Image: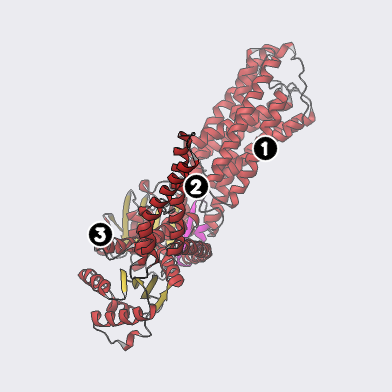
Amino acid sequence: MGGILFELALTFYFAATIVSILELFKSAKITSRIMLLLAGVGFAIHTASIICRYIAAGHIPITNAHEATSFFSWCIVLIFFILEFRYRIILLSSFIMPVVFVLMLSSSMLPRELKPLSPVLRSYWLGIHTVLAFLGNAAFALAFGIGFMYLVQERHVKSKRLGGLFARLPSLQSLDEINYRLITFGFPLLTLAIITGALWAESAWGSYWNWDAREVWSLITWFIYAIVLHARLTAGWRGRRAALLSITGFLTILVAFFGIKLLGKGLHVFL
Amino acid sequence: MKVFVVGLNHKIADVDVREKLAFNGPKLEEGLTKFKELPEVQEAIILSTCNRVELYANVRDAVKASESIKTFLSEFHNINRESLNDALYIYDDIKAVEHIFRVASSLDSMVIGEPQILGQLKDAFELAHKKKTTGILLNRLMKKAISVAKRVRTETRIAENAVSISFAAVELAKKIFTDLSKKVFMLLGAGEMAELAAKHLISNGVKEVIVSNRTYERACELAKEFNGRPVRFDDFIQEMMRADIVICSTGASDYVLKKSQMQKVMKERKQRPVFIIDISVPRNIDPETNDLDNVYLYNIDDLQGVVDANRFERQKEAEKAERLVEEEVETFFKWQSSLDSVPTIIALREKAEEIKKEELDKLLSKFPGIGEKEKKAIEYMAAAITNKLIHPPTAALKEDFEDKDIMVATIKRLYGIDGEKHEDK
């Protein structure tokens, strides 16, 4: 059941992605409505598929790479909809839905079998730690999309070629502010995720920090976003630099996410 | 029954000619009344703006009408009748409808896509309506013209991009900043174009205005005019720390702001973005300043480039609009030809037949035992009644006389066979 729902959600996201890309070329209210509808239906089905999986596994379904990627996409779409209803950022979907689709597609290609969870990991920390981490990273994914939009719009204004998306993209200031807000939302979540991870590690293996690959990468990510925030507050690193940093940050997250999986070693093996 | 247009616009006549033919103020009502009184003219509207003077009419004979309208114009405005022969354009029927639709949609305007013309057309129509100089044809035409214009506006992007320097500056400012009403604006120097752009920007609402000028007295004057604060020229760099939007036009022969100075300003501003418009020729602000992060420097050529690109964009959209207009001209003609009497007679007959049949069926089904002879008699009576009822309107439609189109429209309305009646409501 969960599997069929997953495929269905993937299909809807695919359609939403196509429409969102079309939106770049042709603007019309109706296209953005269709896109929201498709993404909304996709999201509802996706939610149902995660719930199915939860019931089947008996714990939050993020204990293999397939589930984790799927849940990550779910978090991104969730935050996308929150932003959409709060700020109505035109064309945001065109920059985010492709990311969601690619993540979902990779999730669909990863092995899906349910493996029993090792007893060390059976703890309430599983839910707390992972949800914090994924929500934080999803906020960074959105900051990535917004950062990208910023760079496109900045290119238009700086180079004085005002064709293309210039008229439809939001103002530089609002993109910069939303980018900042997303990072200030994601950063504390990431920090808490690292702390809860350490506490969990202590209770599972008796040591707070084990220098496994994911821990190291999380730390690197944490530093990147700490720099984004710190430089902004002290040196006024806003605008283009902030956008570039938030793009770098998210790429680091992706490397951590998939790269470590490929290496396949470490305590976070299930991911 | 034909739509007829006589007029002139900015493309074929200079302002001194347009002035002479303009119907200004009280002249408009007077002119309209006289225009309607011409024997060849059944309905009349006058559109008089600074870029065009146009007379719209419903006429039967285009040749006669054009002669009598020219005579009317020369007498009314006291100008030589001969000189009018080449000065005007004259359209009738399809061409006339197309012209009016294009005017309403701002495709015939000096600045294509400018929105005022639609309002002016509405006013002209309203006055004609009030003075009762319009009837079925022009009423319908004007309503259609207005809806075509709205369609062009919503379905093409003809009015989307700024086509003047001041508008382009404001459009850009809005893409850099979210909310202009929280921004500080500084006018550096003076000059016609700079002041115009400043006015336009201020009318969009800014938080604060700072004015600086080489002569402090001039700064004070301008500050008064713009409701701002004067600042000595030596202090302007200091003030740039606070200014988010700067328009510069000082007439200095060299740069008044160098890149290194701006770099310092940016540091003090904590890199908050600045939009600088350098209208001065020669330029007053080092062009390399644009290389700094969060500094957006536009000079007069850059803005002109934006405006030209937008003009080109509008031209492209105008082509789309032309196709829309063509489509709408066609639907208008479908309606106009439906005013012809033959289809109306047929429709009237069909309607009567339909009612007769319906009522007969209803009656006969209530009395199934009725004899064949009685049935025949009832059918005969029903036919007689309907025929007698529709005979007078049919006869009237077959006659040929002046106000036939009104007759057709009236009959259609009275008998409820005007299929398009509700379309516009």
* Element marked by disc 3: helix
* Element marked by disc 2: loop
Chain identifier of the residue bearing label 1 in the image:
A
- Residue B225, labelled with which disc? 3
Same subunit under labels 2 and 1?
yes
- Tell me the amino acid under the disc marked 3: Glu
> Residues at badges 2 and 1 in contact (C-beta under 8 Å)?
no
User: Relative to residue B369, is residue A62 depicted above or below?
Assistant: above
Chain identifier of the residue bearing label 3 in the image:
B
- Tell me the amino acid under the disc marked 2: Pro
Neighbour tally class for label 2: few under 14, some 14-19, many 20 plus, Cα within 10 Å: many
Q: Which residue is mark 1?
A: A101
- The percent position of residue B165, horizontal first and vertical second, equals 42, 64
- Distance of mark 2 from mark 3, alpha carbons? 33 Å
* Element marked by disc 1: helix
Residue sitting at x 65%, y 23%: A50
Q: Is residue B165 magenta?
A: no
* Magenta part of the chain: B287-301
User: Relative to residue B248, is residue A261 depicted above or below?
Assistant: above
User: Relative to residue A28, is residue B77 depicted above or below?
Assistant: below
